[in-house]
Image (cartoon, grey):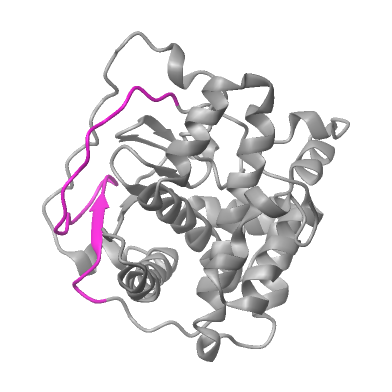
Amino acid sequence: MRLDDFDSSINVEDQRGGGGFRGPGGKIGCGSLIIALVGALVFGINPLQTLGALQNMQGSAPPQALPGKPGSLAESCTVNAFSRESCNALASLNKTWEPLFQKAGIAFTAPKLVFYSRDGQSGCGAAQSAMGPFYCPADQGIYIDTDFYNEMERQMQAGGDFARAYVMAHEYGHHVQNLVGTSDQVNEAQRRNPPMANRLSVKLELQADCYAGVWAARNKDKIEPGDIEEGLTAAHQIGDDALMASAGRTPVEAAFTHGSSAQRMAWLRKGLETGNEDACDTFSTGTSPGTQ
């Protein structure tokens, strides 16, 4: 995917050993959130979706994100090729989604991208590499240890620049959900109806997949041959059933929190084919596009 180079408008924080930059932008209040270690090498973890744990906290405040180290945006975004790709994707995602929010009359705040290595801190608590990339609604941050992309390729057979862009776009989809209030609504519905918690989590994750496809569709001039196949392969490989099977477990739909391989591919494809965020209503149409 031939994304344009990042610019100085993006907000990046670096918790790695060297360099670092924190761009403009504030933080929202931190809630009492727990990040569940759902399993190694699973991206798309939304700390808001910890299935009942959110409302059981006793008011303990999570640790604040570590401050970015002195340095420059260019230093943080060029530590390695994956860092540059992530920054390029963030800039593209901002430019794609902000006009859609303006058109809808909804206030837009760009998220920050936080790089860390092995261990870090987010507004939602600890950040650990085994969690994979995740979005923290408490500080509107997308957290990435770029070593994860090596694991995607080696252990998941889900390499390629578009597969990595899909990771960023999926996490950005959670930011969109946070801004429009979908995440809060799901959180409240899970609290009121715990038996539905997993199903609601799946719907939220599949919508983020669809939003990733919408972004790609609106940047189709940047897509190269083979990109779509890379994205669909990644969506397949991180389906709950595929992950359970690769871990030697029998896939059990009731335990799914992100959706099956077929569902994740279908909703990514839905976004790619329509380029329309309104087509990503997983809550009305069910977990497969076009079903009730």
Residue 200, horizontal then vertical, whole percent: 63, 37
**Which residue is drawn at the image coordinates 73% and 50% (left, top)?**
286
Residue 14 colored in magenta in the image:
yes
The location of residue 249, given as percent across then percent down, is 84, 30
* 252 in the magenta segment: no
Residue 211 place in picture, x, y as percent? 54, 63
Q: Residue furthest top?
A: 58
Extent of the magenta region: 7-34
Taking the image as shown, residue 217 lies to the left or right of residue 286, namely left
Tell me which residue sits at (70%, 70%) in the image: 269
Q: Relative to residue 260, is residue 12 depicted above or below?
A: below
Q: Judge left or right: residue 282 versus residue 109.
A: right
Q: Does residue 199 appear left or right of residue 108 in this picture?
A: right
Percent position of residue 112, x then y: 29, 54
Residue 80 visible at all: yes
Residue nearest the viewer, comparing 7 with 53: 53
- The outermost residue toward the bottom is 221
Question: What kind of secondary structure does the magenta stretch mostly adopt?
Answer: loop
The residue that appears at 49% across and 47% down in the rendered structure is: 133
Front residue (pair 239, 87): 239
Q: Would you place residue 63 above or below residue 147 in this image? A: above
Asked if 206 appears above or below 88 in the picture, the reply is above
Viewer can see residue 157: no
